[in-house]
Amino acid sequence: MKDSINTISIVSVFVLLSISLATSNDSVDFDSFLRCLPTRSNPSVPIADAILTPDNSSFQSIYQLHANNLRIFLSATSRPVAIITALHPSHAQATVVCAKRHGFQVRIRSGGHDFEGLSYTSDVPFVILDLFNLRSIDIDMASETAWVQAGATTGELYYRIAEKSNVHGFPSGYCTTLGIGGHFSGGGYGFLMRKHGLSIDNVIDAELIDVDGRILNRESMGEDVFWAIRGGGTTSFGVILSWRVKLVRVPPRVTVFTVPRTLEQGATELVYRWEHVAPKLPKDLFIRLQADPINNGGNNKTIRVSFTGNFLGQTNRLIQLMNANFPELGLRRSDCLEMSWVESTVYWGAFLNGTSSIDVLLNRVIGGLFYKSKSDYYKTVIPRQGLETLWEALMDIEDVFVQMNPYGGRMEEISESETAFAHRGGNLFMVQYGVQWSDGGIGASGRYVELSRRLYSAMEPYASSNPREAFVNYRDIDIGSNESSETDFEAAKEYGAKYFRNNFKRLAGVKARVDPENFFKNEQSIPPFVY
Ligand SMILES: Cc1cc2nc3c(=O)[nH]c(=O)nc-3n(C[C@H](O)[C@H](O)[C@H](O)COP(=O)(O)OP(=O)(O)OC[C@H]3O[C@@H](n4cnc5c(N)ncnc54)[C@H](O)[C@@H]3O)c2cc1C
Ligand SMILES: *[C@@H]1O[C@H](CO)[C@@H](O)[C@H](O)[C@H]1NC(C)=O
Ligand SMILES: *[C@@H]1O[C@H](CO)[C@@H](O)[C@H](O)[C@H]1NC(C)=O
Ligand SMILES: *[C@@H]1O[C@H](CO)[C@@H](O)[C@H](O)[C@H]1NC(C)=O
Ligand SMILES: *[C@@H]1O[C@H](CO)[C@@H](O)[C@H](O)[C@H]1NC(C)=O
Ligand SMILES: CC(=O)N[C@H]1CO[C@H](CO)[C@@H](O)[C@@H]1O
């Protein structure tokens, strides 16, 4: 290992930032960090092959490869001193131990989809622990369980399950490039949510690297920590190496549909009706909606609402259910597509319509977009007038979408305190407000972020309040945050209540026990605190 790595830039970063540095060792020493790594890792897989510093030719491409949000990536003011692309669990252990000893913050990255890029940015000297190489998926059909490493994507998981069985699946996100390391840590929801709950509701064990570099499992970490990492944002508690999941049963054929309606076609009344119906439908039926402004030409704008459904069964039964529960939508047989469950993951992943190969599930990277998102929970129906407000706000903005995901069903059966994920019974739906653009690039960020805030503020009268709840996987730095290197308790209480409701207190207590010096942190992590 060469020792003279980029000393000049490291030193200048150090000088600039040493004042605000608050780690357990305030002497930041990069050479010592690099020398430490091999002493703490398994020699049979040389860690040298996993260390990238800015001198390495592939540093920049690996840095960017899983940096999903260009709004963040291109505005970052400092880059990591190194990226450790762990090839063996011991490389991740070594990264934690050596970074702590030599004064670097660790940012953990699995799939890099953090909306605010907290897995690959920091204002203090930091290393990225990149887990994309640790992505094995071991499925045991006899017990209907699987061990899945953190760097695996949702798409890879769906694909590997389908290789073994066409009547098993797993409830995770729509997007098939999410890293399960980060995705499960905030809950993980998708179109099986009303039937099977979140990903974490089907997690039965985990391997976690703690602040001392030990690998713990459910038994050795204890139920409190195992509770916290299911929905509490694992990044505050350690490094998830793998999750053990219980697969769920799915029928051999499922049915999907998408029905678009514009305002002129009565979308407002349909959405109003959907608000009442969707959270109460039988669990096998999940209907999400997405509203987009569209242009009919000239200055004639309207809103198109797409109702996308997933039914764990076949068309005949679906049509019966829709006629009984939601006849207003006018679902026709010709709107419906029957397919295997794994094909439905492709459909929801929006790659194609289930007619082509499922190999797209193995694409690990989609990117090239700038975005900002915000989220809301709704416990009461948005009145018609509120919908009008929403449409008006949407028509003011280009490149915007709103997705509404119905809760109810299984989500209602699980208590708020069973896992750290608190948004359970009493929620009708969760909404994502997103702006997403490519034209205008980074220069347009300010304007788009401002527009997303305007939309969010327009909906305030209708959303949940005290606190106005938010979904931690849809990370939004606007709802309260801290600096990279400090976790102020008062600030943390603000975002903590929105993300975790009453579970925040217990999370802070668990944190105080397992990481009292607050080594694992980011701008929205859990502070160590005992009430
Ligand atoms: C296009 C898109 C679609 C999405 N769709 C959905 C959806 O359908 N359902 C849903 O629930 N969410 C969805 N999300 C949100 C997604 O679940 C979160 O962004 C999630 O955190 C991504 O995990 P990641 O590993 O890809 O991201 P990363 O950026 O790698 O990590 C996210 C956070 O978790 C931490 N982290 C990552 N890996 C580990 C680990 N191994 N141990 C400890 N901490 C870790 C990171 O430090 C960071 O704070 C979507 C996001 C995007 C961009
Ligand atoms: C990075 O560069 C160093 C020095 O040139 C080299 O020893 C190391 O093998 C490179 N790392 C990788 C992962 O290629
Ligand atoms: C702090 O870092 C220095 C230099 O890297 C190292 O020699 C020392 O042992 C560290 N101290 C602690 C308490 O970890
Ligand atoms: C705008 O477009 C809609 C849908 O195509 C159409 O029904 C409506 O008449 C148009 N309005 C105007 C003013 O052109
Ligand atoms: C898939 O759906 C899109 C609209 O979402 C449509 O434009 C396209 O033609 C469809 N492709 C196939 C293969 O059916
Ligand atoms: C960056 C950031 O948002 N820092 C905040 C951390 O918390 C303190 C106390 O609430 C705020 O004053 C900072 O602005």
Image (cartoon, rainbow, N blue to C red):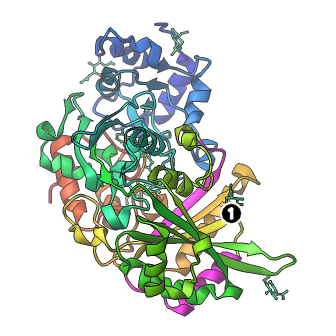
Residue 394 belongs to magenta span: yes
Residue 426 appears in which quarter of the rendering? bottom left
Is residue 230 visible in this depiction of the protein?
Answer: no
* Left or right, 205 with reference to 137: left
The front one of 227 and 264 is 264
Say whether residue 284 is left or right of residue 509. Answer: right
- In the image, is residue 444 above or below residue 331? above
Whether residue 419 is in magenta: the answer is no
* Between 495 and 409, the one nearer to me in the picture: 409
Image position, residue 32 (x, y; %): 37, 15
Q: Is residue 425 visible?
A: yes
Q: For mark 1, give the secondary structure.
A: helix
Q: Residue at x 46, y 41 (%)?
A: 159
Other residues around mark 1 within 10 Å, as few (<14) / some (14–19) / many (≥20)? few
Tag count in the figure? 1
Write the residue at 33% across / 53% down: 199
User: Residue 364 location in percent, x, y?
Assistant: 54, 38
- Point 43% across, 45% down: residue: 158
Quarter placement of the C terminus = bottom left
Residue wearing tag 1: 447
The response on whether ligand 1 sits within 8 Å of label 1 is: no
Amino acid identity at mark 1: Arg
Which residues make up the magenta segment?
366-395
- Image side of residue 197 versus residue 58, left or right: left
Extreme residue in the right direction = 298
